[in-house]
Amino acid sequence: SGKNVRAVAKMPLVAVDLYGDSCGVAYFPPSKDEGAGGNGKGAKMDDEMVAMMRAMAKVKKGVLARSVGDYGETNVTLKKDDATSYKAVKRYLNKGEGHGAVLEDALVVSETKGDNIVIPRPHLFMGVRRTSDLNDATKSKFASILPDEDENAENGNFSAINETNTTSPVSITTIAMDGSSQPKGDDYDRVAFQMKLNSKKKLMTILPEEALALVIAQCKKKVKEEHAIAENGFEEIKEEDDDDEEAYMDYPPAFAIPGWAATDSTIEALIDAAGGSGCGPTLHQRSVAACVGALLPPPTEGNASNAKPAPPPASDLTKLLTETMQIKDAEAAKEAAKEAGLNRTDPVEPDPFVPLVVLAGATEEGVELTAVQITKPQGADAELHCPFGNISVISSVCHALGGEGSTKSVFESALDELREQIGVAVPESEEPTAIVTYGSVEKQAELSSMLKTVLTKYGKDGQGNDDWDGWDQDIPLVSTGEDCVPLGTAVLGASVH
């Protein structure tokens, strides 16, 4: 609601790319109302002067979205056989509070020596009611902690928590959320982790969203620290009172979700994991976030001088789209003038060229391809963070992977499907102006290699074909930074707020 949004208006927005291979984190700082140019005289100026002053103020501030690095593999690593760690985690699970104590006393973020418990990528298990519902990539990657398939499951006989398990520090089980001692194979069942955090104590059971909440809390805490440094420099940050220890938990979050993971049960669990008592999370299609991040100007420092600020440099994708649109519009205008001359009529202004962009991303667990049309170019004085005002999704093809070695076959099939859907949805469109890859450097290199192979094949197949749609190896491939998705998510989340 508007009330909840206003309650967090003075807090930074935390953007998390949970499903990326390295879980990138970014933030957008809280807005500061400086009036017209910050001099308080806007009311006495005419509208044109007010608009000009505000535009200059925007450009002067520079790009506000900031990357703070990544969390890692989104695993939750906890200290084992540590009394303080056990106490903090137990309180957190029993009372649903005490995130700060777990982060301080139990969570291991960097590599350290010692015996630890590792809960692997809990977001992949969120909302799942039984292990058979997990996608093949997750089953293959985490087979060592999954229980054996229960042959009697179809008859309603589900395995309860195995309290005698002493061989594995972490394993997967199924629990009943309705208070029953045994799962019954209904909608109240949930897949959960059981862990031996202390070898002398009973097993602990933790839901995937409870584990993920610790990752999100750590991301919020990291943003709090980075934002404080950005605001105050490297001055010593005063320790907060106990009442404000977990103030960062109310920071509004924004998440990038790939299409293959956007199930109702996953989204519900993610909202629960987001935590905070203020505004709930904003959720964004991961490929669209990548598009926004690819269009975003490179980070620049704010201009503190009184001189007229220069607009920041455009991103590679923005340059390509702008130049292509100018060339296509000039060609269309020339053709319209020529036709008007032949017909001895006034030239008709042609429709502006609408670029088609394909976004290609892949992780260890899934592949996503999305086609968008980008329109409404706007200068830095209008909106610095969004060089184009409209991003319209034409089609999106997403698949969870089926285990190791399936990326190539799934990707090629998905690209064929996307190309066919584009032809049906926007038959008047030309070939893509660009294909943008996003994700880790390794995955982008893999995607670029596959794209070159497939596009070359498309070009050969189209030779001599009058109905060929123009897809070939000449389509520009644009790579992006690893922080592209979290930065784009930060901008989208800020625009929602």
Image (spheres, rainbow, N blue to C red):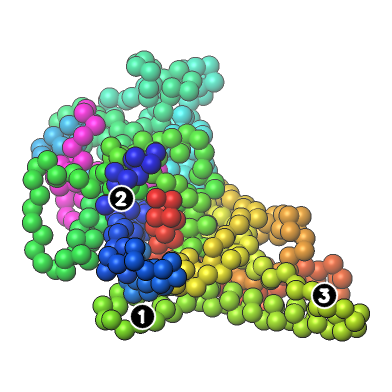
Left or right of residue 456: residue 125: left
Quick check: marks 1 and 3 in contact, CB under 8 Å?
no
Tag 3's secondary structure?
Answer: loop
x and y percent of residue 427 in the render? 77, 60
Quick check: marks 2 and 1 in contact, CB under 8 Å?
no
The residue positioned 26% from the left and 56% from the top of the image is 223
Left or right of residue 261: residue 177: left
Kindly identify which residue carries mark 1. Answer: 309
Identified by mark 3, the residue type is: Gln
> Foreground residue, 243 or 411?
243
x and y percent of residue 4 in the render? 33, 40
- Which segment is the magenta one? 94-123
- Whether residue 250 appears in this view of the structure is yes
Kindly identify which residue carries mark 3. Answer: 463
Identified by mark 2, the residue type is: Ala
Disc nearer the start of the sequence (2/1): 2
The residue positioned 34% from the left and 51% from the top of the image is 74
x and y percent of residue 111 in the render? 22, 57
Q: Is residue 115 magenta?
A: yes
